[in-house]
Structures are given as structure tokens and as C-alpha cells.
Amino acid sequence: MGREALCTCIWNGRKSDVKALLEPPELILRGETRKRIPFAKMQDVHVDGDQLRFKIEGEPVALSLGSAMALRWADALLKPPPTLAKKLGINPETTVHLIGSADDVALKGALSEAKGVSRRRGDLILARVDTPEELHAALMDAADRLDAGVPIWFIYRKGPGHPLNENLVRMTALATGIVDTKVAAVSGEFSALRFVKRRS
């Protein structure tokens, strides 16, 4: 849901020209005022004419976006964020084919919203992988389902110092003829990339 605008910012009475980016879970300001504002810390979000107004740590902020954009941004800021289950495409009708272990609290919570979890078949594949070897094994395990068009999420640890990272997951998976379509934050510790069979 990336959105951006060149606008005037009035932060606690100080006016500046900024580029504002709505990049959940943050509002990012670049230019004469540089800030990263977590949605969760914004208070009293509302629209006043052509301005989006809110408070952050008690300081009033106004962004002159135009009335239509201000309304859209306010709606985006006030809407509850999607659950992890929704981001992954899990609903009460989904059977998840799980490869590896659900060793993260957020991931377990998302799986609890599924119809069921299977080690063999499913409408969606989740592969928890930590090493290149586990990634290759998951690709082999899921090969027939991927050929049938079932999507797969590879869930791996975030940050430096781990055997797998986003680039390695992407490069390895792309080489097998599947293509990445989404990225999602699973938790503070894990990230995920979604792949589907490349259309011929």
C-alpha cells in the first residue's frame, strides 16, 4: 500500500517541505523534516480541510495533502492492520501444507485460523527453512504441488548472520521456475516470501 506525496508539514508549529511516504507500519518524512513515525504511536488522527492531522508524543503535526488524499491516508492509518493469517492467505477454509516446524508464536497463531494443517497436501504451502539444504528439500517436497499451481511461502530468519537471506531464497527458488509475488513480515524474528509457478 505504498503511497507518497510532496507536501507541506507543520510539526509543532515549524513549517517545512517534505516528501511523505505511507509505508506500513510507518509514515516516513523526507526532506527538510526527516522522521519515521510508527502508526501505532500516532494519536488523534483526523482530517481538517486539506490537512491530515495527528499527534506524536504530544506534538501536533499537520500534512497538507489535499482533502481527497488526506481522507484516504486517514482511512489507511485508522484501519486495523491485516492479521498474519490474512497476509499469508489463510482462512477457515484453507488447509495448509506445513514443511518444517511452526516454531514462532505469530506463525502458530496464523495456522490456528486454518481449516487444518497437513504434512502432505494443502491449498497453501508454508515452508519454515533455516539453511540452503532445508530450502532445497522444501522445494523438492513441494515440487508436484507447485506444478499444480499451489502457492508456497518460505519463512526464514530476518537479519544478518543467518545461512539464508531474502536474496538467496529468491535466487534459489527462481532457478526452479517459480516466481516471487509477495513479501511479508511474520514477526520480529521471521520474514516470508511467496512464490507461485511461473506462467508459461
Image (cartoon, rainbow, N blue to C red):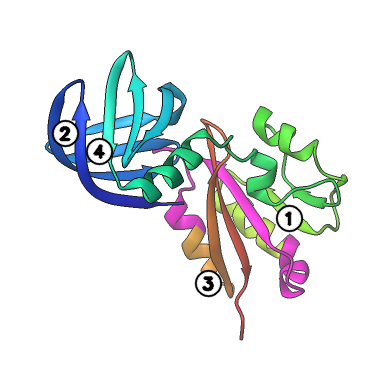
- Amino acid type shown at disc 2: Thr
Mark closer to the observer (4, 1): 4
Foreground residue among 195 and 4: 4
Q: Which region of the structure is painted magenta?
A: 141-169
On screen, 178 above or below 42? below
For residue 81, side relative to residue 105 (left or right): left
- In the rendered image, which residue does mark 4 sit on? 29
Disc assigned to residue 125: 1
Q: Is residue 162 left or right of residue 48?
A: right
**What residue is at 43 percent from the left and 30 percent from the top?**
39
- For residue 33, the mark is 2
Q: Position of residue 141 (x, y in %)?
A: 75, 61
Asked if residue 32 shows in the view, the reply is: yes
**Given contact means CB atoms under 8 Å apart, are the residues at marks 1 and 2 in contact?**
no
Q: Which residue lies furthest to the bottom in this view?
A: 200
Circle 4/circle 1 CB separation < 8 Å: no
Q: Distance between the residues labelled 4 and 2?
A: 6 Å
